[in-house]
Amino acid sequence: MNIISRIRVTIFGLVGPLLNFPKPFSFVGPDASLSLAREIVGLGVKRVMVITDGPVFKLGIVNPVIAELQKGGITVEVYSEIEPDPGYELVLKGVEQLNKFKADAVLAVGGGSSIDGAKSILLCQANNCHPSKLAGVWLYSAPRKRGLPFFAIPTTAGTGSEVTIAAVVSDKQLQIKHAIIDPKVVPSMVALDPKLMTGLPPFITAPTGMDALTHAVEAYISTIATDETDALARMATASILRNLPIAYAEGSNLEARERMAVASCMAGLAFTRAGVGYVHAIAHQLGGLYHVPHGLANAIVMPQILDLSKSHCAHRLADLARVSGIGNAGASETELADAFIAQIRKMNADMQIPQVVKELQRNDFDKIIDRAFAEAHGTYGVPRYMTRADATALLERLMPK
Ligand SMILES: NC(=O)c1ccc[n+]([C@@H]2O[C@H](COP(=O)([O-])OP(=O)(O)OC[C@H]3O[C@@H](n4cnc5c(N)ncnc54)[C@H](O)[C@@H]3O)[C@@H](O)[C@H]2O)c1
Ligand SMILES: [Fe+2]
């Protein structure tokens, strides 16, 4: 089993660098969202559907962007029904609204849920299909059509969805989160506007930031990492370790917010090629079964997986420690790897992130392990394969005390 998985991942690793993944043109800085809106106007687009979620829409974050589009003569319709971890129903409803409105472009504004919802809506509409038909890696499916012109403005600094080839969509009935992996979902242009993130409360800033860190770390320890993903993952890690505590403690700090937005993007670019790992494979199950927010699940699971994997990637974790200024000069690789993992635990504790998953139930262990292994094995370049016993012991450590 592990040998077949390793061969499949190795093939991914060899083929991956030959594939051309689009990278969106990015506007960065305060009011970058308005620059993007003006650029959309300049394209001659006439009807834009803005896809967002209810709370973000009610906060009014989207209003200046909509006003800028309207000022340029664009008719705007808002679909604000996206919820965390959007399911098939919301996607299908969005497709219906998109068709009715006869949009000629889509702008997603929000966290990963809004951007992924928009990505799924666009791909379903273009291919006239149910979202369940799109799950998995595009290479194994029939050729697909690209959706309408697509733009995105993230309002969390976490998922990196604005630059990735992934869209996560949930099957609420089966309680499973599926990933649609397809370069056709990448937006053409994005804006990283720290002004839209200053109102993000600390309890969302912390887990979303830890999601970005998980992307960087899992990409860096991946067996299919490349020179390019390494550079991005190292920069993202160092920046998140420095700026996330500031953004958490001082939400209105525009500089820290902007650096987190850029780091989250770099981590997204890194994992879109190098993949993620067991942290995500388990976190997705905790999200699907118990609705644990994605970043929170990653933050809780990451130190446990790193403890388990470090015998096979101590040198990589040591690199991340060095680049982030952690550990003493002259420390061994193992000591540096341990210091890096300890730093992640400290950040979690400082940001009130728990060590256990309060919803976790022992009678779900088998389901979680089966699904996590099915997701990870043969897809992710994990440095050390887990046995069932490893996974069971890990879940036991995550049980509420
Ligand atoms: N496509 C990818 O590459 C990728 C990568 C990682 C995760 N994901 C997926 O993204 C989803 C999670 O996205 P997320 O972590 O960004 O959270 P989210 O989009 O679910 O948003 C979380 C909460 O934050 C609120 N919010 C967002 N921006 C805000 C702001 N500026 N001010 C105040 N409140 C704000 C939202 O209303 C929501 O209640 C999960 O479904 C996850 O699986 C996708
Ligand atoms: Fe993630």
Image (cartoon, helix red, strand yellow):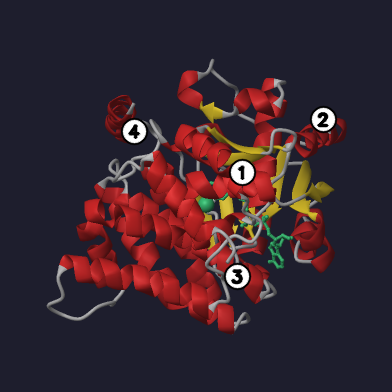
Residue at the image position 56 percent from the left and 69 percent from the top = 354
Q: Are marks 1 and 3 in contact (CB under 8 Å)?
A: no
Sequence-wise, which precedes: disc 4 or disc 1? Answer: 4
Sequence-wise, which precedes: disc 1 or disc 3? Answer: 3
Q: Which residue is mark 1?
A: 363
Counting other residues with Cα less than 10 Å from the Cα at mark 2, is it few (<14), some (14-19), or many (20 or more)?
Answer: few
Describe the element under mark 2 as helix, strand or loop: helix
Q: Nearer the viewer, mark 1 or mark 2?
A: 1
Amino acid under label 2? Asn
- State the quadrant of the N terminus: top left
Q: Which mark is residue 99?
A: 2
Q: Quadrant of residue 55?
A: bottom right
Amino acid under label 4? Gly
Q: Nearer the viewer, mark 2 or mark 3?
A: 3
Q: Residue furthest left?
A: 330
The answer to whether mark 1 is within 8 Å of ligand 1 is no
Q: CA distance from mark 2 to mark 3?
A: 35 Å
- State the quadrant of the C terminus: bottom right
Q: CA distance from mark 1 to mark 3?
A: 32 Å
Q: Which residue is mark 4?
A: 16
